[in-house]
């Protein structure tokens, strides 16, 4: 197996490129409902793509808190990204007459901004969890993810449901060291993990239309009380978390280790993550989804092509630079104040 690049980790750049494509495609599929095959494909994507994205985020969170100090620059960056993202989406909804701008709520998010809010929360927990070994932390966080489904009111407020359900993947990434990851990607594991993941994906594609609520147990704020049998809830959620783990593991076997055309995309996922959702909303309000649901597999082809075009548009250096300028505005000044206060 090729070792991962120590200077620039192109393995993760390429992996993030694949994941941001799935994020974009998943969001373009999200408005489609009913019995369409696209709904099943959407649910398959949502079983694993955010767990794997969160795992990668956790892997790179090791530098957030070192030597007793936070990397507040990164946290401020995420806070501003979250606020701007929420405002931008609300503006689009208001302009399209779907929602009044005054209804904006920074403390309750069911859409794409939840991930940025969750990242801030997970970062803030690092000083606590780093004091403990990985196994106890993972056991506790998995238990919390399973218990969360019993609370009817836990959901979009403070993104609590997703923070708890995706938390184990973040902490798994945080504790994961490169040598361990390299051992996990040896061919001996590939022969077992990949067939298992393929079988899971085939099962979801074959029976996904009959498991509508169950397949939402990971990425949606669904409590166990929305299932036919409440007692099945934790078992369904645990099964889906295991499925997400295995599919994510399998995907990593196929990610290139060296620099590819995907690498530049993986290095600039934030502009894509924030702006594609706004473009999707504009298309949605324009009425394009009134027709896509009836096109079947051809609609999937159209949305895949659209996702690729949107990604390449949004990783254009001019777009990336403008987004980064906005997100880093005033950050040096705030960062300087924080550093001076810490010195005092």
Image (spheres, rainbow, N blue to C red):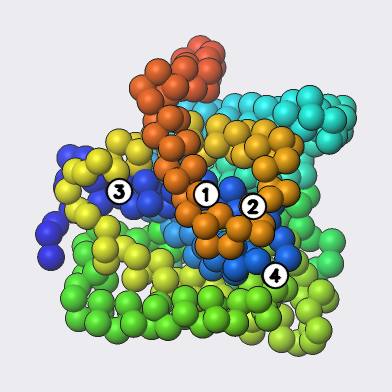
Mark 1 and mark 4 in contact? Answer it, CB < 8 Å. Answer: no
- Judge depth for marks 3 and 2 and give the one in front: 2
Q: Which residue is mark 2?
A: 292
Q: Which sits earlier in the primary sequence, circle 4 or circle 2?
A: 4
Q: Which sits earlier in the primary sequence, circle 2 or circle 1?
A: 2
Mark 2 and mark 1 in contact? Answer it, CB < 8 Å. Answer: yes
Q: Which residue does the image show at 60% across and 68% down from the upper left?
A: 37
Q: CA distance from mark 3 to mark 2?
A: 30 Å
Asked whether the viewer can see residue 49, the reply is: yes
The quadrant in which the N terminus is found is bottom left
Asked whether the viewer can see residue 140, the reply is: no
Q: Neighbour class for label 4 at 10 Å: few (<14), some, many (≥20)?
A: few
Q: Which residue does the image show at 59% across and 48% down from the upper left?
A: 28
Q: Which residue is mark 4?
A: 35
Q: Which residue is mark 1?
A: 303
Q: CA distance from mark 4 to mark 2?
A: 13 Å
Q: Secondary structure at mark 3?
A: helix
In x, y percent, where is residue 114? Answer: 64, 46
Task: Pick whichever, 245 or 260, lies toward us.
Answer: 260
In the figure, 200 relative to 51: above or below? below
Q: Which residue is mark 3?
A: 14
């Amino acid at each position: 197996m090729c070792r991962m690049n120590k200077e620039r980790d192109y393995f993760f750049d390429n992996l993030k490129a694949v994941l941001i494509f799935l994020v974009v495609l998943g969001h373009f599929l999200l408005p489609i409902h009913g019995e369409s095959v696209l709904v099943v494909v959407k649910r398959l994507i949502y079983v694993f793509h955010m767990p794997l994205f969160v795992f990668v985020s956790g892997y790179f969170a090791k530098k957030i808190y070192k030597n007793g100090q936070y990397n507040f620059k990164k946290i401020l960056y995420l806070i501003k990204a979250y606020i701007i993202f929420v405002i931008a989406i609300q503006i689009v909804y208001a302009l399209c007459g779907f929602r009044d701008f005054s209804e904006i709520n920074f403390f309750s998010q069911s859409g794409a901004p939840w991930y940025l809010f969750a990242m801030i929360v997970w970062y803030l927990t690092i000083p606590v969890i780093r004091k403990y070994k990985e196994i106890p932390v993972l056991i506790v966080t998995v238990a919390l993810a399973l218990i969360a489904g019993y609370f009817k009111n836990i959901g979009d407020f403070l993104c609590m449901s997703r923070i708890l359900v995706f938390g184990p993947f973040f902490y798994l990434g945080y504790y994961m060291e490169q040598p361990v990851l390299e051992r996990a990607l040896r061919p001996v594991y590939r022969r077992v993990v990949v067939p298992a993941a393929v079988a899971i994906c085939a099962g979801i594609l074959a029976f996904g239309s009959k498991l509508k609520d169950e397949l939402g147990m990971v990425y949606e704020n669904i409590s166990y009380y929305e299932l036919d049998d409440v007692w099945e809830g934790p078992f369904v959620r645990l099964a889906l978390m295991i499925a997400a783990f295995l599919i994510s593991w399998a995907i990593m076997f196929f990610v290139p280790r060296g620099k590819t055309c995907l690498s530049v995309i993986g290095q600039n996922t934030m502009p894509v993550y924030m702006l594609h959702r706004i473009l999707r909303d504009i298309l949605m309000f324009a009425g394009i989804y009134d027709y896509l649901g009836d096109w079947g597999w051809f609609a999937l082809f159209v949305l895949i092509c659209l996702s690729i075009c949107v990604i390449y548009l949004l990783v254009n250096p001019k777009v990336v630079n403008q987004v980064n300028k906005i997100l880093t505005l005033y950050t040096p000044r705030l960062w300087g104040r924080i550093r001076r206060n810490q010195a005092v």
